Structure formats: structure tokens, C-alpha cells
Image: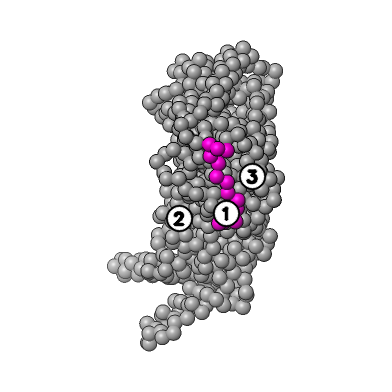
Amino acid sequence: MESFGAIGTVLGCGAGIVVGGLVFAAYKLGLLYQLFHKTETKSPRHGGESVAEVLRAHGVKYVFTLVGGHISPILVACEKLGIRIVDTRHEATAVFAADAVARLSGTVGIAVVTAGPGLTNTVTAVKNAQMAESPLLLMGGAAGTLLQGRGALQDIDQISLFKPLCKFCASIRTIREIVPTVRKALAIAQSGTPGPVFIEFPIDTLYPYHVVSKEFGVKNPPKGLMGKIVSWHLNNHLMNLFAGAWETRDMSPLPVDIPQATDDQCIELVSRAKKPVILLGSQATQPPTPANDIRKALEDLGIPCFLGGMARGMLGKDSPLHIRQNRRDALKEADVVLLAGTVCDFRLSYGRVLNRRSKIIAVNRDKLQLMKNSDFFWKPTIAIQGDAGSFLVRLSNGLKGHRCPEEWTQSLKAGDMTKENANRAKADEKTERHLNPLKVLHCVDELMAEDSIIVADGGDFVGSAAYIMRPRGPMRWLDPGAFGTLGVGGGFALGAKLCRPESEVWIVYGDGSLGYSVAEFDTFTRHKISREQVPILGSNVACGLAFTDYHIVTDGYGGKGYLVGREDEDRLSDIIRQAQRETQEGKATLLNVLIGKTNFREGSISV
């Protein structure tokens, strides 16, 4: 009897395994879901509409793209819902423009590109957004769900390509997944340390049922049992793809997790400081704290500040607290250094410029960036993983009535003015050929409108611009960030102009970087961006590249180009004013400036 009991147990276990296997198979094939959710075969709706509805619910105003058949339903649906579609001449520009919108608007920038080469063209721009910590959603087309890995047109493993670059990657497998996946991606992009996210949309998840069903039909199915199995599988896959697709779903934004930085020790440390310094990085400009609140906090603290990246302009044009020169010397003297969103990478000589006797407070959302190179060249006295902007506001509130010793600030400002005057004198020197680049930059700085946004795209020439051109207020400077990518200019300017249509937007190009996005003058013309004033400053820097008639290229794309050389030195201001008038009349304008060699180089002033 015991043997029969054992047999029964074995049979029972075997039956359980079989049943479990069948249930699992039914789940994977969507059979269980289809029992309770209807497939509306007559509905004209498509997956692109679901994407557009989520984007609208999240306040998205712009989608940047280079169109392709894989993604057309998203673009058509967005346009119908009032989301502006801006098509560029290169996919990288679409991502750069979305990056700029993310930085300036405090929302997630959106780029949509087609499958395969369309997506691979965005890799550099996505990596730039990752290193600049910009919240960005990239959506890409893909081969149909049943054709992936089978040699379909433009079919590659896109998820593996973007996993190292993005905080979150997903491939849509059924239409019902679109809404929750897009909501999740948008929340992740903004949470913690912001960054890019990627969603892949197989083409059959975006088109209507009646279109997709035609592609699933087998013209000459195999005969017999195998033919029936193939037909059943294709039909079941189609039905599961659309099952429950149009049921009502929550489109609203998910909560965003932003780490808050708190430490009462910092208040005591700063209050005792005689020579404190703040190094403010781009991360401090990120939501949720408005830039003007951060500016007020810095002014209330009264501590001298060095501003980098997107933080340039935070204190306005002529703040007594903003120190632009002699940073290395200031850090040697400082007794307290506050790294607010600033990283000890190559920009701070990996931490070697910090005095080991200084008390160092480091605040950063990202733990790796917070402690970068602390095992070699520097050690934080207090390291806080959290949001730098809100930390500064709380620090200011905790130090009400306290002011940094004015003699410290005044001494740094005096050294600042001495260096500025020396640099200004260099601008008056004659170069062997062409124009002095420093004179050109000083002239533009003097003539820029107060609401101007400066886009920096280049090497030496742009490095010089960073120490001469003065953003007039917060969020009025855009550069690529730590990755140092060339070619951001056209996309950044496009995104900036859409966010701030009332502002002048100046791109400071090196001649090498201009070549990457000069075709976007066509984009400026087609989308009438030029009528909202986009003067552009080009530069033929002496760096081994042959002179290029970029001013003629600009004319060909519907803009207005000027060639400016030594013979135009006395009327340089008049030419710049004329370029500004041209933009007001509807033309994107480029000044192709011939500049000569000067001993003023980024390395000699990056102190």
C-alpha cells in the first residue's frame, strides 16, 4: 500500500507540474489576459495616440524628431493634441534640442527617432545628456514584435545599445503596456540624479489593428497540423497585442523622488568660516528649486561664488559675489569650500586644487559624483547625497542674519577686476592676421540684449568666451557639460528659442563645431525660429581646418551670412547690430569671423 501511495504522490506532482506549465504558457501567450479583456478589432485607434495622451498629461509642449515610418503614428497623434512637432536635419540635433528644453523648462525633453540608424545617430547626444544629468525621454521605432532577431529591415539589439547610457530602457510588447511604461519612464528620468531614458516601440505596437492585421496574414500557410499551429499562433499574437488596448488608464504623472540634503553641521561650519567659497555646478539649477530662489539664497549668504556650466549667470551680469578669475588662488586661501553640485573631475584637477587644510562640504545627488577622486586627492569634511539647490536655500534660512566677512569678498573681487582689465587689454592687441578673437567676444558681450541666451559650442574660442561673455541672469548659458561634445549648437539653440521665444539666442561656434549643425539653419528657417531672433556667431579658429564659406552655406539654407575680417574691424559693432536687425526681420544670421592667433587661450585663464 505504501508503494501505491508513493506512486500517487509522484503522479500528483507530475500533474501539478504539467498544470503549472500549461498555466505559465497560457500567461506568456496572453490567453489568460484575453479571457477578461476585449480586443476591439474595429477600432481605428493606434498606439501613437496612447503615447501622445501621456505626453500631454505631463505638460509636454515639444517633440523633436527626424521622421521615419516606424514612428509616424506618434508624431501624427501628438500634433492632433496640440504638441508641437519640430523636425530637424539630424537625429542628434533632435536629442540636443530636447536636452536644452529639459534644462530650461524643468520638464522632460522628448525626442522621437526611427529604428536602427536613426537611433544609432543619437548615441553621442544621449551620452551627453547622461553626463549633463538632463532628464530626457528618447523613443525609437523597431522591427515588429515577431520579426525582431530575424533579419528585418533596420533590426538591431537597440536595448543593449542604450542600457549603458540610460537610467531605464524598455521595449513595448503589447499596446496596453504603453501608458504605464511611458509614465514610469518620465518619472525615472526626473528622479534621483536626472538622466535619459529609452523606450523602444516595435512598429506593430503603433499602427491600428486593421493595418497590423494585414501584415500578420500568411498568404500560403503550411498545410496540415503545422499550418494550423502557425495560423493560430499568429492570430493569437495579434489578438493579444491589442487586447485591452483602449481601456481607460491613469495618464497623470507619477511621483518624482528627489533626495533632500540636510545636515545641521554645515550651518555651524559655515558660520565660523572667515574665507568661505562656493563652487556652484549645473546640478544646482535642476528642479524643484527655482533658479531665482537659489540666487536669493546665495545673495543672502554673501559668500563669494565661482559659477560653472548651467550655473553661469546665476548671480547676473555684475554681481559683487561672482568671482570669474583666479579660482586656483582663491581655493588655496579658502578655509571652507562648498561644492554645490560641482564634481572633482578634470575641471577641478581631480580635486588637487583643493587645499587639504580647508573644510570641504560636498553636496550632490549622485553618490559616485559626490565622492569622485576622494580616495586620491581630496577628502570631504561633510559629504551629503541630496539636491544642491534646496540645500542652499535651507542653509541660507539657517544662517539668517549671518554674512560672510566683506573684506574676503572684496579682496577676491579686486583680484578679479585686475585680471579682467588685463584680459581686456589683450583684446586691444593686433593679431598678425584677421581679427583679435577677444575683441570680437567683448564687442558681442557689450551689444547682447539683456534677455540673451548664450549657447557655447566649440573649443578654444568658446573657452575664451566663457571668461568674457557674461550671461545676464539665471538659466541663460548652455554648454554641453562634462562630455565636451561638439555639435550641440544647432539643437541647443532650437530648444532654447522655443522655451524663451522673447529672448535673443547667440551660438558661439568654433569653425569645427559649426560644421556639425550648419544644416539646422534650414530647420530655423522652416520653423520660423529665425523670426524670434537667433543671431549666431561663427568663428574660423586657427586650429588646422581650412577656411570654409559658412556664410554662403547659411544663405543657401535660407538664412543670412556675413564674412567678417580685419578690414571690417572699425565697423564690427555696426555689423553685429545689422545681424540683430536681420533676425528681427525673419532670417537666422551667421557671422563668419576670421580671427587670428592670440596668446589668450583657455589653458592660460582657466584658473
Q: Earlier in the sequence, mark 1 or mark 2?
A: 2
Residue 158's x, y, as percent? 43, 58
Magenta region: 555-568
Question: Rounded to the nearest whole Å, what is the CA distance between mark 1 and mark 2?
Answer: 26 Å
Q: Which residue is mark 3?
A: 579
Q: Residue 555 has which mark? A: 1
* Quadrant assignment, res 258: top right
What x and y, as percent, mark residue 106?
Answer: 63, 44
Instruction: Tell me the element at label 3.
Output: helix
Please name whichever residue, 382 or 414, is drawn nearer the observer in this view of the structure: 414
Identify the element where label 2 is drawn: loop
Residue for point 48% across, 30% down: 431
User: Magenta stretch: residue 564 in it?
Assistant: yes
Identify the amino acid type marked 3: Ala
Q: Earlier in the sequence, mark 3 or mark 1?
A: 1
CB-based contact (under 8 Å), mark 3 and mark 1: no
Give the CA separation, mark 3 to mark 1: 13 Å
C-alpha span from label 2 to label 3: 33 Å
Q: Secondary structure at mark 1?
A: helix
Q: Residues within 10 Å of mark 3 (few under 14, many from 20)?
A: many
Residue 551 visible in the shown view: yes
- Disc 1 marks a residue whose amino acid type is Asp
Residue at the (48%, 28%) spot, across then down: 600
Can residue 255 be found in the magenta stretch?
A: no
Report whether residue 250 is seen.
no
Crowding near the residue tagged with mark 1, few <14, some 14–19, many ≥20 C-alpha atoms within 10 Å: some
Going by the picture, which residue comes out furthest to the front?
567
Where residue 407 sits, quadrant-wise, is: top right
At label 2, the amino acid type is Asn
Up-down: is 428 above or below 64?
A: above
Instruction: Say which label, 2 or 3, has the lower sequence index.
Output: 2
Residue designated by label 2: 121
